[in-house]
Image (cartoon, helix red, strand yellow):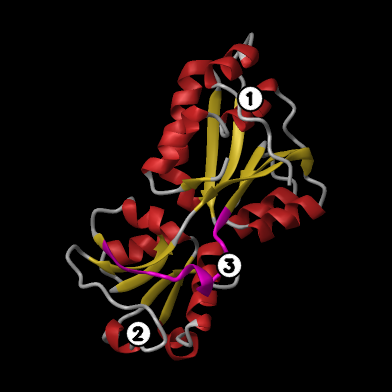
Amino acid sequence: MLRPVASAFALTLALAAPLHAEEVVVFAAASLKNGLDDFAARWGAETGNTVTISYAGSGQLARQIVAGAPADLYLSANAGWMDEVEKAAFIQKGARADLLGNTLVLIAHGKGAAAVDIGPDLDLVGLLGGGKLAMALVDAVPAGQYGKAALGALGLWEGVAPSVAQADNVRAALALVSTGEAPFGIVYATDAAASDNVTVTATFPEGSHPPIIYPVALLSNATDPADRAFYDALFGAEARNPFEKQGFSVLN
């Protein structure tokens, strides 16, 4: 994968300053909301351009792009869905790169929940106490796919599968736990940080699931200078703080 050369934020703005305001349409994984909203608002204020972001599960967004949805950039929570978009020839040549990394955690409703040892000996069904384990869609949404892979690697999936409550995306799974509809859930660490009403009780071992990587791509529909400017700015210093503040690791 090719990575654009990270440029100084001010230089990016100077080169991209539009004669009239332009709109950048971004399709992004739901788990990116807080950090991406923060950065997009600041970038828009500096450039005078508008950034419109549609958040959903990465698979849902990929299917919309392939079906012809008018998006300029796509940020996925895993490489697999980005691959599908690239295979369909919707990515500009040389305009795809890995942007962020994340970790997978087990969360509990409320504050002060006791930590658990996440491993083959964990009685996860007993821990649920008859309640549900909230997860994003395990066959379509990256957070759910990572979670299922981790539980499978630890020998826990078959036992807990009947107790899983699947949500459309990872933020919806977080909401189930935050509101108490589910006592536990599996989300990204960055999602847990976005809620004041959940506790991280365990972090899944890195080797229990594929690496959690967020690639970004400039799509074939992106023809305005602002589209490329926003893409490049995501790799600049000004984008690092909003993402790191949410707990992402910045890969560029």
Q: Is tag 3's residue or tag 2's residue first in the polypeptide sequence?
A: 2
Kindly identify which residue carries mark 2: 124
Amino acid at dot 2: Leu
Question: Relative to residue 163, is residue 179 depicted above or below?
Answer: above
Q: Is residue 21 magenta?
A: no
Amino acid at dot 3: Pro
Q: Is residue 241 left or right of residue 27?
A: left
User: Disc 3 to disc 2, how far (Cα)?
Assistant: 21 Å
Q: Is tag 3's residue or tag 1's residue first in the polypeptide sequence?
A: 3
Which structural element holds mark 1?
Answer: helix
Kindly identify which residue carries mark 3: 210
Q: Identify which residue is drawn at 72% across, 32% down.
A: 222
CB of mark 2 within 8 Å of CB of mark 1?
no
User: Disc 2 to disc 1, how far (Cα)?
Assistant: 46 Å
Q: Position of residue 84 (x, y in %)?
A: 74, 57
Amino acid at dot 1: Ala
Q: Which residues are magenta?
A: 199-213
Density class for disc 1 (Cα within 10 Å; few <14, some 14-19, many ≥20) is many
Please, which residue is most extreme toward the left here?
A: 112
Q: Mark 3 or 1, which is nearer the eye? A: 3
Kindly identify which residue carries mark 1: 229
Q: Which mark is residue 120?
A: none
Q: Identify which residue is drawn at 46% across, 52% down.
A: 31
